Image (spheres, helix red, strand yellow):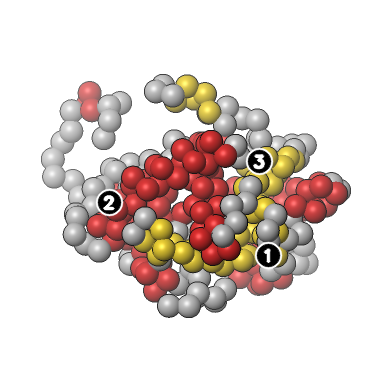
Amino acid sequence: MILTADNYYSQEANKHYLSVSQYKDFQGTYGKVGCEEYALAKIDGSWVEDMEESDALMVGSYVDAYFEGTIEDFKRQHPCILKKDKTLMAKYEKANQMIERCERDKKFMQMMSGEKQVIMTAYLFGADWKIKIDSYHAGRCIVDLKTCQSIRKEFYHADIGHINFLAEWGYYIQGAVYQEVVRINTGVKLPFYIAAVSKEKVTDIEIIQCEQSLLDEALIEVERNTPYILQLKSGEIEPIRCGGCDYCKFTKVLTGPIWSSELLGEV
Ligand SMILES: [Zn+2]
């Protein structure tokens, strides 16, 4: 199957290829619990996520679309973000402020000025992977645009302590896979950068390079988990429900009461 901008997110492509977002749906990140049944439901099309439900997601997608150069298509696809006079609704004006802040910085714009939305595929750890690079500087670096609440926000987890937003949302995993897929295609291992922009009252921006040791660590984790995900995708293994995600809530069938003491415990 040849991937293009038109079929990249198609059901057929998601069935054939493994992607970082699919991987994270199965495996989870520190910030979001994985759910095998939800991941499979997304792949077979029986569960569709409604992006417009979340204003935060829409702001992020708007900024993404701007840097992709597809902002007019985005407005056509999501008319709900526009007022009658075709200007942005107040709650999405933040997105324009964020874009203006990025445009005011030469370095940020230079990092985002690579080849846009570059699609590559590679066979890795027994799977065909697909990736889409936000800004690819061939032979130089890979850049991914991320909108976040706050660039310096700390996330706390009892088992590992405080972590940054890259670890929280699995961006080292993304960097590791992108770097490796590019290496397989071109023979060159390139540095991976996050071009970060925050949704705070005053927008913060940063270009963040991922330390190679952290990417190497993440790739080992991907290598360890990929065979199991492939077995789930092929139906060899029955998926487990996380019990807590929107998909699990929506499809839950009660079989009897639970104990009140279970409410605060692990599902
Ligand atoms: Zn679930």
Please state the horizontal and vertical placement of residue 93, each as a whole percent of the image. Answer: 74, 51
Q: Secondary structure at mark 3?
A: strand
Residue contact between numbered discs 1 and 3, judged by CB atoms under 8 Å: no
Q: Residue at x 36, y 68 (%)?
A: 15
The answer, for residue 153, to whether it is visible in the render is yes
The location of residue 206, given as percent across then percent down, is 73, 40
Looking at the rendered structure, the secondary structure element under dot 1 is strand
Mark 1 highlights which residue? 116
Ligand 1 neighbours mark 3 (CB distance < 8 Å): no
Work out whether mark 1 precedes mark 2 in sequence or the reverse, and give the earlier one: 1
* Label 1 packing within 10 angstroms: few (<14), some (14-19), many (20+): some
Identify which residue, 106 or 151, lies in the foreground: 106
Residue 64 in the figure: left or right of residue 4 = right
Residue at 22% from the left image edge and 23% from the top image edge: 261
Q: Residue at x 78, y 67 (%)?
A: 85
Ranked by sequence position, the earlier of labels 3 and 2 is: 3
For label 2, count other residues whose C-alpha is less than 10 Å away and answer few (under 14), some (14-19) or many (20+): some
Q: Measure how far apart labels 3 and 2 are at the Cα level.
A: 30 Å
The three-letter code of the residue at mark 3 reads Gln
Local secondary structure at mark 2: helix
Q: Are marks 3 and 2 in contact (CB under 8 Å)?
A: no
Residue to which mark 3 is pinned: 209
Would residue 258 be found to the left or right of residue 8 on screen? left
Above/below status of 247 relative to 164: below
**How far apart are the two marked residues, 1 and 3, measured between alpha carbons?**
19 Å
The answer for how far apart the CA atoms under marks 1 and 2 are is 32 Å
Relative to the observer, which residue lies in front, 170 or 61?
A: 170
Residue that label 2 marks: 228
